[in-house]
Amino acid sequence: MGGYVDRSEGVQDVLDPLEVHVVTVADDGHRFALVVVDLICVNADVVERIRTALRDVGVPSCWVAATHTHASPEAGCAPGGGITPRDVGDRLVAVSLTATRRAVATEREARLTATRTLVSGLASRRNVVDSPPMDIPVDTIGVTVGADVVGLIVVSPVHPTILPAANNHVSADLAGGIRRALSGPDRWVVVATGAAGDISTRHTRQGHGPPEVDRLGALVADRFVPPAPVDGGPVAPVRPPVSRSVRLRPKQPAELDASARPVPQIRDGRIRQVLQQGLRIAREQAARQRSEPYEIEVAAVDLDGVTVVGVPGELFLELGEAIRSRAADRAGDVVVLGYTNGYLGYLPARDTPPCYETFASPVSAGSGEIVVETAVEAAIEAARDRDRSRRNYA
C-alpha cells in the first residue's frame, strides 16, 4: 500500500471502494475533462497515458488529479516523482476512459459557480505542537441547471490520513467521507484535494476508523452552503488550459548537509516519528546526488468564470492561499488543486522551519514561491483568454 513510510503490509481488504470520477466541460469548439482518482498520487507517465486515451474519445484537454488517500495501492509515489506500476496504470487508464465516455454521453447545459466554506474543527497544521484551532477553507464549484444544484466539485486542503499506517484496507478516506455526506439522489459529488501539504486531521480527529471518516465528512457537509444559481450573463467558450513548464533546483549540498544535524527534541510522539522518517528520506536524496533540475507542469483553466489551478505536488496551505489572493483581482474566483498532472513532492515555503516536509522535499528552498509565481501568471492568462472571448462574443 502507498502513503505511509512506516507501512509494512500490502492490501488485505476493502473498507470502501476506490473511485474514479470524470467531469467534462464542453462547447462546440472544445472539451476539457477533469479526472479525479482515489490514489496516493498520479505520476506524469500515467497522466500522459490517460490524456492520449481520452483524445480518441473527443477530449483534447485533460487534467488528472489524485485525492492523495493514504489507503490506496502504491502508485509510484516518491519525492521527485516515480514510475506508475503497470497494473495500476492499466486499470486507471481503462476506468478513466469508461468514466469519460459516460460523462460525455450525459453532458447537458449547466452553469458553474464557486463558493467557499470555512470549517472549524476539521484539521490544523499537523507538524505544529499544540496547533491552534483553524478555519479550514473548503472550496466548491457548484454545477447548476436552472435553480437546481446537480453537481459539486469539492476541494479540501486536508491530508486524507484519518486511517493510520496500521490500516491495510483500501479506502478513499476523508474524500470518501465528504462524498457520501454531500451526495444525494439528484446530485453527484467529486472531491479533490487542494493545498494540503501541511494540513491534516492529526490534532483534530477523535479516532482512526470509518466512523471518524464519516464524522469529519458530515462536519464538512454540515457547514456547506449551496451555491446560488447563476443569473444569466454570457458564457465564455471553453478554452484549452494555460500550461507553464517550471524547472526547480534539486536540494543543494548545504540543504542536504542540514539534514545530518541534530534536530530539537519534540514531545509529540507522532511528529517526532515522522520527522525521523523525513531525515531518512533526506539522507537517501543526498546519496543520489542529483544535479539536474526537476521539470513540472503548472496549469490553469477557466471554467465558466471559475479559474482552476493545477499543481503537481504538495503545496502548503499558505502558498495555495497566496495563489488565490494574488490572482483574484484579474482572475476572479480561484480554486487550487494539488496532486494534479504529476507528483513532485512537498513544496514548502522558503521560511518554513525544519520539519518532515522540508526534509522529504526533493527541491531547493524557495521552490514553493516559484510555483506560486508561475501559477498566478497562468491563472491570469486563463482569465484573460476568458475576457477576450467574452468581448469577441459580445
Image (spheres, rainbow, N blue to C red):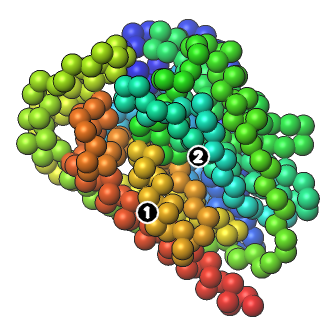
Using the numbered discs, state the Cα–Cα distance from disc 1 to disc 2 in whole angstroms.
19 Å
The residue singled out by tag 1 in the image is 375
Q: Secondary structure at mark 2?
A: strand
Residue visible at 62% across and 82% down in the picture: 387
Give neighbour class at mark 2: few <14, some 14-19, many 20+ (Cα, 10 Å). Answer: some
Q: Is residue 187 above or below residue 259?
A: below
Depth check: give the residue in front, 303 or 30: 303
Location of the C terminus (image quadrant): bottom right
Locate residue 287: give its quadrant.
Answer: top left
**Side of 356 relative to 14 (left or right):** left
Residue type at the position of mark 1: Ala
What amino acid does circle 2 point to? Pro
Which residue is denoted by mark 2 in the rendering?
137
Rendered residue at 80%/78% (across/down)? 233
**Residue sitting nearer the eye, 182 or 98:** 182
Q: Image check: 74 left or right of 346? A: right
Percent x, y of residue 106: 84, 53
